[in-house]
Amino acid sequence: MTAAAGPEHGTTRHPPRPVVLLVPVPGTSTIHELWAGTKLLVVFGISMLLTFYPGWVAIGAVAALVATAMRIARIPRGVLPSVPRWLWVIVALGGITAALGGGSPVIAVGGLHLALGGFLQFLRITALSVVLLALGAMVSWTTNVAEIGPAMAVLGRPLRPLRIPVDEWAVALALALRAFPMLIDEFQVLHAARRLRPRRVPHGRRARLRRNALEVIDLLAAAITVTLRRGDEMGDAITARGGTGQLSANPARPKMTDWVTLAITTAVCGAAVWVETAFHLAR
């Protein structure tokens, strides 16, 4: 006799996994130990590649590069967020709508001629979006947010003779990255507390709309108040630790592994550009 895994259908329903960003995955690896500036340069280079050469070859090369980096960094599967059902429905509707646009290539199935051009374009854009999201998530899972500000200050050093406030931009970015997860937690607590409050049941559609508008206004006011309070506390903490200059000061610099990573990324991007160019010239 075997026990059922679920109460009714014999299956175990796992809770949905939320999106986890700006929080490094515990552990260490070669990817974790890379300089933050190297990761930013890789993201910038790959973004430029996919902007000017958004073909299947470039997408596949970047996908292989990201998958290899995830394997080296030992990113667990539990970090990947669950995909809600409504998103699958939207993707399916988008694919069906794009397929109605037609275009080459055209295949014949049972006497019917199907134009797959629009559907293939939709698949390519979807794959491009997934690869870019995976690339950004990879940087988020392997990089401490405190390292990004100093890396931006180092990378922007050539712009200082042009009187561009690189250090101020780096400080603003560092503060935003540090405050973003904290504010998300605060907003979730506010939303949960708001839902626990007893509410009168409105009668009529107009009353429901009015109640929803008042709830949004109350949440926005509470969120602004919490943000100002957190900003004041963070300002006091920064002042006690030596000012904003400490946020953009970090002695970390690229090492041999960083140069190897940049060389591999450059080689992959160059090969993808060469193949894409040769393919277009052949056509």
Image (tube, rainbow, N blue to C red):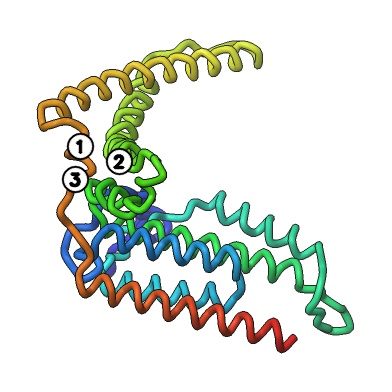
| Image coords of residue 189 (percent x, y) | 31, 27
Callout 2 touching callout 1 (CB < 8 Å): yes
The residue that label 2 is drawn on is: 167
Residue located at (51% from left, 13% from top): 214
| Image coords of residue 251 (percent x, y) | 15, 54
Q: Confirm whether residue 237 shows in the render.
A: yes
Q: Confirm whether residue 4 shows in the render.
A: no
Callout 3 touching callout 2 (CB < 8 Å): no
Q: Which mark is residue 249?
A: 3
Q: Is residue 70 above or below residue 281?
A: above
Residue type highlighted by circle 1 = Gly
Callout 3 touching callout 1 (CB < 8 Å): yes
Q: Earlier along the polypeptide chain: callout 3 or callout 2?
A: 2
Rendered-image quadrant of the N terminus: bottom left
- The residues bearing labels 2 and 1 have C-alpha atoms spaced at a distance of 8 Å
Label 2 secondary element: helix
Q: Is residue 84 left or right of residue 14?
A: right
- The residues bearing labels 3 and 1 have C-alpha atoms spaced at a distance of 6 Å
Label 1 secondary element: helix
The residue that label 1 is drawn on is: 245
**Residue lying furthest bottom:** 282
- Residue closest to the eye, 93 or 258: 258
Residue type highlighted by circle 3 = Ala
